[in-house]
Image: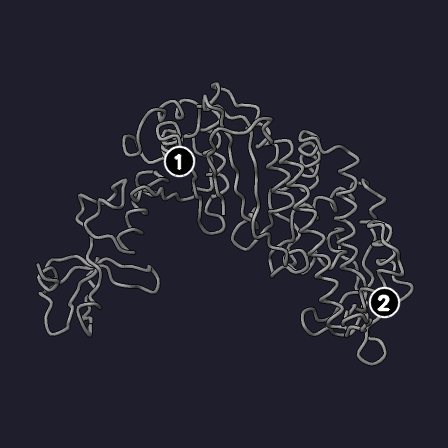
Amino acid sequence: MSVRELYVKGARVWIPDPDQVWRCAELTKDYKNNIVAVVYDDAQTEDLVVKNDEELPPLRNPDILIGENDLTSLSYLHEPAVLYNLQVRFCNQNAIYTYCGIVLVAINPYDEMPIYGPDTISAYRGHSMGDLDPHIFAVAEEAFTQMERENKDQSIIVSGESGAGKTVSAKYAMRYFATISGSDSETQIEKKILASNPIMEAIGNAKTTRNDNSSRFGKYIELDFTPSYSIMGANMRTYLLEKSRVVFQAPDERNYHIFYQLCSAAEQGKLPHLKLRKPMRFHYLNQGLQEGPMVASKPRKGHQDNFHYLKQGSSPHIDGVDDAEDFIETCKAFSLLGINEGMQEQIFRILAGILHLGNVVLEEGNGDSSAISTGDKSLKTVSELLGIDLEDIRKWLCNRKIVSGREVFTKPMTLTEAVFSRDALSKHIYAKLFDWIVTQINKCFAAKAKPYRFIGVLDI
């Protein structure tokens, strides 16, 4: 059947719409002479001119197929067909999962759903994908069964936009593996993995305009299995940490949660040696590539507003989130994973040092050079917290070393270069601390013997 034979009177099509994205319409007469005459649901009519058959509007699927749980079963598989089918399943059938072949499409309901309990896990155990309604447990069951049957390692990729629910989906997949490979209760390794969540969210998640708890890094967790296919250990790798967020946040966004947790603890009189209660005396009038003159800054309410690295997004608080309570949970998680109070103290000193480093006032020096005042209190605090000689850090924040053959030169940096250098140092310190914490967590996860097989879950 030719394309033109499909576009006859009564055929239903999708028309692009600036408000609804796609709008359903019906042809009022057969398509000819490059004219598509349609009528919409509200009785509005329109004649659309197309240059060729490739510009014809997409055809709508028959009503009997609308709401199918597998997109590949639709007669027409294009953007409006996919979006409308997902809309019907989500809004009319209260179904957040839909298959697209071997791929599972999930829509975040932003609410707790009673579909992840032990009874649901038992229901999907032993069933192939397609036997029951689409579910993350069906995908996990398929991976586990393939590992058992074919004796091969497996991986699950969880991909999507910020706020789509990737991290939660990955968590449910791992819960399924932990349950079916051990007893009905959570296994010890899953408890450890769950205990790491508050830590990884604190140091790797931040508020964005689209998600109050957005993961700003990729995470790959490898679950290791014994020959009897019970979990024996795990290993976590991280990718693409958004280091730029440490020194800059867009409007209505925050830095990483851990900084605000520290400041909230300081507001309650804790960690006085970190000097997080000290107000910032100055700030740059213009931030970015061009630095403006130094002007007096009146401290605002909340210690997070004392730091340049925390105030740029002008959105220090998240509705329904108590940073002080979260800080307590983060500390408990550190302790559960074997990071003792002494190590925690060092972590907090480094984090506080980063905040104070962002408050170091860089000034224009003589010629194309920069300088830091001898009375800069933030620089002194950085020196104390990070254990760096005061004069060394003063020198190398404003100068750089050039090695040419056997000669070594010290070249002063301009104000703009010095600001970039300071921020680059802050980002580098945070990234190294992040990697170190992940290493410590992996030591807690590590299996004592060589794993027989593994299932990887990539959340990116």
Task: Point out residue 329 in the picture as x, y percentages from the top left corner.
Answer: 67, 34
Q: CA distance from mark 1 to mark 2?
A: 55 Å
Query: In the rendered image of this protein, does residue 354 appear above or below residue 265?
Result: below
Residue at x 81%, y 59% (from the top left corner): 280
Instruction: Specify the color scheme.
Output: one colour
Name the foreground residue: 231 vs 78: 231
The amino acid sitting under disc 2 is: Ile
- Check the image and report above or below for 432 versus 175: below
Which part of the image, by quadrant, shows the N terminus? bottom left
* Mark identifier at residue 304: none
Secondary structure state at the residue bearing disc 1? helix
Q: Which is more N-terminal, label 2 or label 1?
A: 1
> Which residue is at the front of the view, 64 or 92?
64
Quarter residue 107 falls in: top left
Residue at the spot x=87%, y=62% of the render?
Answer: 376
**Which residue position holds label 2?**
372
Which residue in the structure is indicated by mark 1? 136
